[in-house]
Structure formats: C-alpha cells, structure tokens
Image (tube, grey):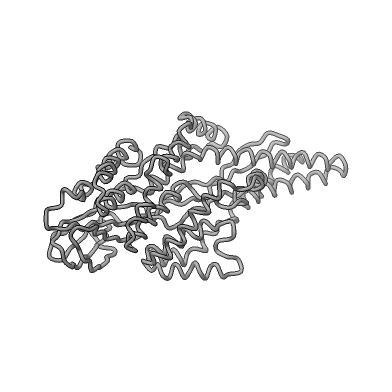
C-alpha cells in the first residue's frame, strides 16, 4: 500500500471513529424530558436549576437565550405566569441584541463551527415568545399588555411582516440547486428543501387578537383580525392544510346568544421538531485526495401521541377541539429559508480546514521531511473533523399543535374535563373548575406535550 493510500485509509478510519463516538448533549436532558412527559413541569424546572449548578452547566453562557426560552415555556406550563413572562422577555431582549453581535463571532464560525457564537435564536422562537407572553398577561388579568404582545407580531411593521420581507428575495430555485449539489457530492438527497419562506401570518396570533380585541370592546379591530385568519389560511397553504376551525366563527361576539357566555378552550399538544446532527461524507480533491464529512443540523420530528382532544363540560355538551395551527409545520417552514446558507457555510468551512491542513503539511515536509509532513497532515485532518460539529441548539419545549374549541353556556361555575386521546384510548386528562362570566373573555388553557 502506498503512503498516500495509507494516509487516506487512516483519515477515513479516524473520521468514522469520531462520527461514532461524538454524541450530542441531548442525554443531559433525559431527566427533564421525562418530567415534561409526566406533565410535572415543576420538576422539569427544578431539573434546569440543578443542571445550571453543575460544574458543566446545562446551558452555558453562549446559550442564554435558550435557557430563558426553555425555562420560560416550562414556567408557563406550570402556571407561573409572572416568572414565565420575565424569562421570555429576557429571551426576546437577547434575540434583539443578537443582531449587533461582534464580527469576531462570525469569523470564528468559519474556522471552528457555529457553536462558537452565542445562540441568536430562530425566527419561530422569536414569534412564539410573544404569543406565550400574551397568554401570560391574559392569565394575570392584564388585557392591554396581552394585546401589546400580540401587536408585536401583527402590526404592519411587526415580526411577521419583517419575517416575510427578510426572505422574500430568496431564489425559488435555490432549494433544487442545493439538493442537486448535495446529491452529486455526497449521494444523499434527503435534505430539507430550501425555499422562500411561505409563512407571513399566524392564525394562532390572529385568533388571540380577535379574542383580546373583543374583550376590550374594540369590535372593529376584532373584525379585521378575523379576516386576517382567513388570509393566513389562504396565503400559507404549506402550513394550513386543514380547514379553518368552526370555533373561530363561533367565538365572535355577534354569534354568542344574548344572556349567555362563551367558554373558549385553547390546548397545546405534542413537542415540536428538534435539530439533530447528520453527517455527510464528501470528496475533496485537493491538496490531497481525501474524504471529509459535513455536520449539518437537520430538523427531526418527535413522536406525538395525541390524536384527539375532547372537552366535557358538566351539565352541558362535550365537544372535540380542532387544529388551529400546526406549530411544527411553522418551524419547518421558517427553518427551510436559511438552510441553504447553513449548508454552504459548512461546506466552505470544511474545504478551508482541509486545504489549510494540506498547505501546512507541505510546508512542514519541506523543512522537516516526509514523516513530519504526514503527521501534520493527519493532525490537521483530525482537527478539521473533531471541530466540525453541527449547531443543533433550539428550544426543546415548544408545542407541536395548537387546538381550539368552545361552547356557549349560561354564566356560572362549571367542572371541565379535558381528555387527551391516542386512538380510542385516553392517555391523559385534566380537570378544571371554571367560572364563566357574561360580557368578558373566558379562555381556558390546557397543555399536554406527549
């Protein structure tokens, strides 16, 4: 076997070894994930607290946004509205500050990997922060502040409009060209499509706007937001593949019989997709023929057990909730818009690392001989692969689906049971005592992340 072939064999072996032995830190969330599945959100929050006290903290300084976002969501599910608001507000503030991060962080991402920079947050995380904070304010009885949070998304200069503008010039052929390149270089063709983002309106945000405006007596604004729900469904077909829930029309003030009150129910179910690292092998013909790998963050769906949600109101009819927003689809759609830049950056970084190793090896070989050059080359390739880690950071605790429903009732106090089904079996239920008042918003919220 020639020296060149021996080196190639050694490099491929090292790459395979590193790919097998290097694991993500997802195992560190096992205890917290288990508590979430058991709906013990207080225990999950405590798990984060303990994780931060370890010598190697669960969220390091570069992951401050994730710490506040994950904890804020869990605090919301636990009913700790004020603490949830404070955490989510901190996450939103840090996301805004991420736009002014130093150029040094961007430079290091081309030398080592994207994990060297502070996590800047994803578009979908920034959107849902305001939705959950609007719900926090509603639960605290502050309707005006709830509307402020929703308006951050829905006004003409809001986040939804800015998201559409930021991605409106993406070439629609980019995804096809990228996948063709990936297939040619690696033989893999299962990467996400990369297209102009087709999400510019959130039915969930608009629905909450309708309810909040009606509660404050601004019927004209509520009418405009109601029309925006229909526009969201018609303009975002890749996300809203289902029919507009009948509960949307039924929740409008003019459709509630005189003397009765409307009980609106909002339930979140399942866990949204998360990023996982996928290794792709590609060929680099220079400065020495070799195989290298790309580490890419790919969205992967998590198992969702809930197939139906039933609401039983004591002394009244039972009804099933309807899907309003597929939050997992929103996440996939907004992530597609920037996947091309992630791939291209990773590809360039991999080539630069290997070219640098080759150039350095030749310099060492001229000065110190062939063996020293070989060691330098192999060491450089090991460094290139060992530092090539995909940035799989994102919130772990966003729901996958948002469901709505409701019923018209005589004012009074009711016992409500919310059953979560998988097929014909009830896998979880929640009991609540609800006071329904006429002339005000009665919004009952439930969550099951199975």
Where residue 405 appears, x then y in whole percent? 23, 53
The residue sitting at 25% across, 68% down in the picture is 431
In the picture, measured across the screen, residue 311 lies left or right of residue 191, that is left
In the picture, measured across the screen, residue 53 lies left or right of residue 127, that is right
Which corner quadrant holds the N terminus? top right
Which residue is nearer to you in this view: 308 or 57? 57
Which residue is nearer to you in this view: 181 or 269? 269
Using the image, determine if residue 141 lies above or below residue 281.
Answer: below
Which corner quadrant holds the C terminus? bottom left
Could you say which quadrant of the image residue 155 lies in? top left
Q: How many callouts does the rendering have?
A: 0
Where residue 378 appears, x then y in whole percent? 74, 46
Where residue 399 appears, x then y in whole percent? 38, 55
Instruction: Spot the residue most to the right.
Output: 367
Say if residue 184 shows up in the picture.
Answer: yes
Say if residue 450 shows up in the picture.
Answer: no
Using the image, determine if residue 242 lies above or below residue 262.
Answer: above
The residue sitting at 42% across, 58% down in the picture is 397
The residue sitting at 74% across, 49% down in the picture is 379
Which residue is nearer to you in this view: 415 or 401? 415
Where residue 182 appears, x then y in whole percent? 54, 35
The residue sitting at 78% across, 44% down in the picture is 374
In the picture, measured across the screen, residue 311 lies left or right of residue 98, that is left
Which residue is nearer to you in this view: 287 or 409? 409
């Amino acid at each position: 076997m020639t020296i060149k072939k021996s080196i190639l064999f050694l490099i491929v072996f090292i790459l395979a070894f590193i790919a097998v032995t290097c694991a993500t830190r997802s195992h560190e969330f096992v205890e917290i994930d288990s508590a979430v599945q058991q709906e013990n959100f207080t225990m999950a929050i405590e798990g984060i607290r303990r994780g931060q006290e370890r010598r190697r903290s669960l969220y390091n300084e570069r992951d401050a946004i994730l710490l506040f976002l994950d904890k804020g969501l869990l605090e919301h599910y636990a009913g700790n509205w004020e603490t949830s608001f404070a955490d989510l507000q901190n996450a939103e503030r840090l996301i805004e500050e991420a736009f002014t991060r130093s150029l040094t962080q961007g430079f290091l991402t081309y030398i080592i990997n994207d994990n060297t920079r502070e996590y800047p947050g994803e578009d979908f995380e920034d959107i849902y922060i305001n939705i959950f904070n609007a719900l926090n304010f509603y639960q605290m009885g502050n309707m005006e502040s709830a509307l402020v949070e929703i308006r951050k998304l829905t006004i003409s200069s809001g986040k939804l409009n800015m998201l559409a503008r930021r991605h409106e010039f993406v070439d629609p052929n980019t995804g096809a060209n990228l996948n063709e390149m990936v297939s040619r270089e690696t033989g893999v063709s299962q990467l996400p499509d990369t297209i102009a983002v087709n999400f510019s309106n959130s039915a969930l945000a608009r629905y909450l706007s309708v309810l909040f405006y009606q509660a404050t007596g601004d019927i004209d604004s509520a009418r405009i937001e109601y029309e925006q729900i229909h526009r969201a469904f018609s303009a975002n077909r890749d996300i809203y593949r289902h029919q507009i829930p009948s509960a949307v029309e039924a929740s409008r003030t003019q459709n509630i019989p005189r003397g009765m009150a409307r009980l609106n129910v909002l339930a979140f179910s399942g866990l949204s997709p998360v990023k996982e690292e996928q290794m792709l092998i590609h060929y680099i013909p220079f400065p020495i023929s070799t195989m290298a790998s790309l580490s890419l963050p790919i969205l992967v769906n998590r198992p969702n057990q809930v197939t139906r949600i039933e609401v039983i109101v004591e002394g009244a009819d039972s009804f099933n909730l309807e899907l309003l927003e597929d939050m997992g689809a929103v996440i996939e759609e907004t992530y597609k818009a920037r996947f091309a830049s992630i791939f291209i950056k990773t590809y360039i970084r991999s080539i630069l690392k290997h070219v640098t190793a080759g150039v350095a090896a030749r310099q060492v070989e001229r000065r110190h001989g062939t063996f020293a050059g070989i060691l330098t080359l192999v060491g450089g390739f090991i460094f290139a692969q060992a530092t090539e880690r995909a940035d799989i950071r994102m919130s772990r605790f966003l729901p996958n689906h948002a469901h709505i429903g409701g019923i018209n009732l005589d004012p009074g106090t009711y016992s409500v049971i919310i059953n979560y089904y998988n097929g014909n079996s009830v896998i979880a239920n929640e009991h609540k005592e609800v006071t329904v008042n006429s002339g005000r918003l009665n919004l009952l919220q439930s969550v099951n992340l199975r």
